[in-house]
Image: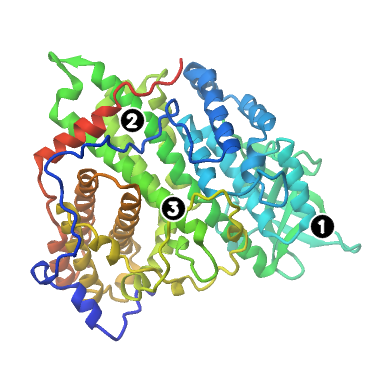
Amino acid sequence: MKLLDIPQNMLDIASDLLPDSLIPKPRQARHLAQKASPHLPTHLILNPKQANYDHLDAHSQALVKKTIEFFENRGKAKLKEDDHERTWYADFLAFQAKEKLFATFLTPEGYGNQDMRWDTFRNCALNEIFGFYGLAHWYTWQVSILGLGPIWISQNEQVKKRAAKLLKEGGIFAFGLSEKEHGADIYASDMLVTRQDDGSYRANGSKYYIGNGNKAALVSVFGKLTDTDEYVFFVVESQHANYELVQNVVNSQNYVAEFRLNDYPIREQDILAKGQDAWDMALNTVNVGKFNLGWASIGICSHAYYEAINHASHRRLFDHYVTDFVHIKQLFSDAYTRLTAMKLFAQRAIDYMRVANPDDRRYLLFTPMVKMKVTTQGEEVINLLWDVMAAKGFEKNMYFEMAVKDIRALPKLEGTVHVNMALILKFMGNYFFKPAKYPEVPVMDQPVNDSFLFQQGPTKGLGKTRFHDYRKIYRAFDLPNVNIFKRQIRLLKLLLIAGKPSAEQSKDFDLLLNLGELFTLVVYGQLILEKAKLANLEDLLIDQIFDFMVRDFSRFALQLHQKPSATRVQQEITKRMIQRPAVDPQRHQLIWERYAFAQKDQYEMNP
């Protein structure tokens, strides 16, 4: 794997590696206030009972509020009963059909009513809400998005109009890509499509791990043409006689199907794409769909946080409330700041998804990070909260019991963390050493259709993608932990120059994973700071976020340092990366009082 293309001009790089004492201070340095700002703190964690969604247009706002009302009226007892009994969510699907929820949010402009459009900004409102109330309802939405992707990307107007009609009727959709023997290895598809004498086709083969595979109005299926060995994407109906529903491969509310096509008749008008276009269609659909997984994690963690803080703040042990203990305050503060960082990054990534065009493909780095980094951070948040909840987290009437199960699934869907890390590593050289100039990207909350997502084009040449200079936003913040983190970044760049992995080390994917984790943290911090600046967040909250960022960077640096194959140079540089966060007891206390503990009794789901 080619990790870096080091530029010939080393002067710019060298200047970035100067010791702190020689680096000029930013002209408008932001210093951590000695006490909290007088205005009320900005809480990003979703509270469905308080959120007004006034940033959405009136119709979207009404639909989002109706969705929250549906879940709250249904109540937690019913939510838990359906989860335990693995009940198919027919009532939810009936609700969304009645309100034309999926149709409004998932029909691109021009194929439905005036208020129907594919708007990533408002889609993420539903993403978060569905995650908040349970992964099952998010999942049927998510796999509908994947199933619709190839249809909206295609040039097949007949299927597009058919899909729009089915959406309006309340239909859900499925994405037939994975196979039992090959997983997501789409090079090796065994779904075969054979041309008949009359010009039609017959499809034979099976697909595995296909959400909504039992009820999908249309399933977008990936396979190969037997006569040309070309890839092909086509649509089938799950209720057709030649569509065999083999089994539900999971033990949950969802129906994650294994299905088989037995001489399924395919017409030319059922085909979405052939050859390279079909291949690109598969990958570009995943580019759109994987972005949603991070938002599901944010929703799950938000609900779990409320339940944990409510439980701990009312429970007395050894003549103290649980939240009086120092280690409990630390656990909650860490969980709160990690969850806030997850949402900051995912919110900022929306902006880059929406400004994307053929000359600006920065989203190709940020999208897999919402899938990979945000979801793994979600696991961290739940782990922290579970150390507070302890045995209570197992109880059958707690949302938390669902959260600890569901949060593990998200990093494993749409390709593993490892697959996404391999993708991300391709961007590292250009990100660090070849910045390009782009216009400033504002908050992209305009109620417009995101047309480019279905016009992404060829999927080759990822290594040529350019990024704006990450140093600009880092230089805008002069905060203790941000400054420590900037030193760690400079050492990482030094490692990539003076201790670049050898050809042999580049075959060690475990080593590359650790290197990728360090790179990922730099990108994560960049978008967090960009969004924090746009949202005008308090310095003390930003600096507390970078408290855990410094610790995480040190952890991965230590792992890289201890790799058996690490050279002397690599060991020395990674040793210097291991840093202690800036200690500020006043900041810790203010974070606890104004942010982490302030969520006490703010939300509880209706019984």
Q: Nearer the viewer, residue 478 or 321?
A: 478
- Residue 361: percent from the left, percent from the top? 49, 66
Q: How is the image coloured?
A: rainbow
Res. 305 mark: 2
At 24% from the left and 60% from the top, the residue drawn is: 476
Label 2 vs label 3: CA separation? 27 Å
- Residue 599: percent from the left, percent from the top? 30, 28
Q: Secondary structure at mark 1?
A: helix
Is residue 238 shown above or below 480? above
Residue annotated with mark 3: 443
The 10 Å Cα crowd at callout 3, few under 14, some 14 to 19, many 20 or more, is some
Q: Is residue 249 visible?
A: no
The amino acid type, in three-letter code, at marker 3 is Val
Label 1 vs label 2: CA separation? 49 Å
Q: Which of label 3 and label 1 is nearer to you?
A: 3
Looking at the image, residue 581 sits to the left or right of residue 427; the answer is left
